[in-house]
């Protein structure tokens, strides 16, 4: 059983020097990295937004962080996370925080439709899957939080971030080809958090 001091985010990893106290097994660096990222996001939102919008934004950002890790590790965006995230965006809109509810409903529909159409066209043209089924649902969730007016900018930021990632991989001489899988959820997450800070100010 873990002691209380072993459960403190980030600090526990530092105190234990990256190893389990009982068995000595190494604790992966990604655990404290994710904890640190969650803390940075919370502070950034608290500084940038009014209290209610910041609290809602923390729930959004932490869920997006979890989805980012899942997509990076497993290319997996489970419905049990993306669909509740979409619903939460609509509830936040109903509470009067950020964009109005009607804009969010339209945003959710348009967000799903745009990426679902892109995925369909890619399959027809290339003969293979380019976007996973979870990406349109995640972009629908982005629309439910940001409203339809922010979707073009959100998609532009996400696409630019994805291009930058691919270019960085080429620069460091990693093998990159037309068939290389690049998870898109981290880019959508990044763009959505920026978008939320903008619309909820």
Image: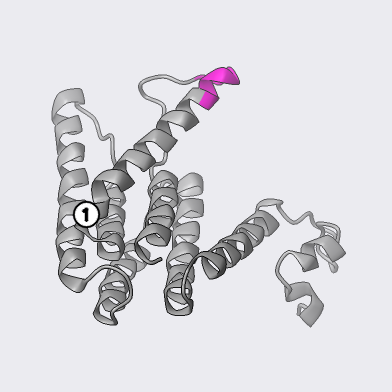
What residue is at 20 percent from the left and 72 percent from the top? Answer: 101
**What residue appears at the point 16 percent right and 53 percent down from the top-left corner?**
110
Residue drawn 17% across and 45% down? 114
* Camera-side residue of 42 and 165: 42
* Residue 2 visible to an observer of this rendering: yes
Total count of labels? 1
The N terminus lies in which quarter of the figure? Answer: bottom right
Dot 1 surroundings within 10 Å: few (below 14), some, or many (20 or more)? some
Queried whether the magenta region covers residue 194, the answer comes back as no
- In depth, the one of 141 and 23 nearer the eye is 141
Q: Residue at x 28, y 34 (%)?
A: 130
Q: Is residue 169 magenta?
A: yes
User: Where's the C terminus, which quadrant?
Assistant: bottom left
Q: Position of residue 128 (x, y in %)?
A: 24, 30
Position of residue 162 measured from the top left corner of the image (x, y, whole percent): 41, 35
With respect to residue 72, does 173 lie above or below?
above
* Image position, residue 37 (x, y; %): 61, 57
Residue occupied by mark 1? 149
Q: Is residue 164 above or below residue 175?
A: below
Residue 97 placement (x, y as % from top left): 33, 75
Give 168 or 7, whichever is nearer the viewer.
168
Magenta-drawn segment: 168-175
Q: Is residue 3 visible?
A: no
Say what secondary structure mark 1 lies in. Answer: helix
Q: How is the image coloured?
A: one colour
Left or right of residue 81, residue 47 in this image: right
Query: Quarter of the image holding residue 47?
Result: bottom right
Q: Quadrant of residue 131?
A: top left
Q: Is residue 80 above or below residue 194?
A: below
Position above or below: 52 against 64: below
């Amino acid at each position: 059983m873990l002691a209380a001091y072993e459960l403190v985010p980030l600090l526990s990893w530092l105190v234990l020097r990256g190893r389990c106290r009982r068995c000595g097994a190494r604790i992966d660096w990604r655990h404290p990295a994710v904890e640190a990222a969650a803390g940075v996001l919370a502070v950034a939102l608290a500084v940038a937004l009014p209290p209610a919008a910041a609290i809602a934004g923390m729930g959004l950002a932490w869920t997006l962080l979890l989805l980012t890790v899942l997509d990076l590790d497993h290319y997996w965006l489970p419905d049990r996370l993306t669909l509740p995230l979409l619903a939460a965006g609509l509830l936040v809109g109903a509470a009067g925080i950020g964009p109005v509810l009607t804009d969010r409903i339209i945003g959710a529909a348009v967000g799903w439709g745009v990426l679902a159409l892109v995925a369909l066209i890619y399959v027809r043209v290339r003969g293979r899957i380019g976007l996973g089924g979870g990406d349109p649902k995640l972009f629908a969730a982005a629309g439910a939080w940001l409203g339809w007016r922010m979707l073009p900018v959100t998609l532009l930021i996400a696409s630019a971030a994805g291009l930058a990632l691919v270019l960085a991989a080429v620069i460091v001489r990693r093998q990159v080809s037309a068939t290389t899988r690049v998870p898109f959820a981290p880019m959508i997450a990044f763009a959505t958090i920026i978008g939320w800070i903008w619309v909820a100010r």
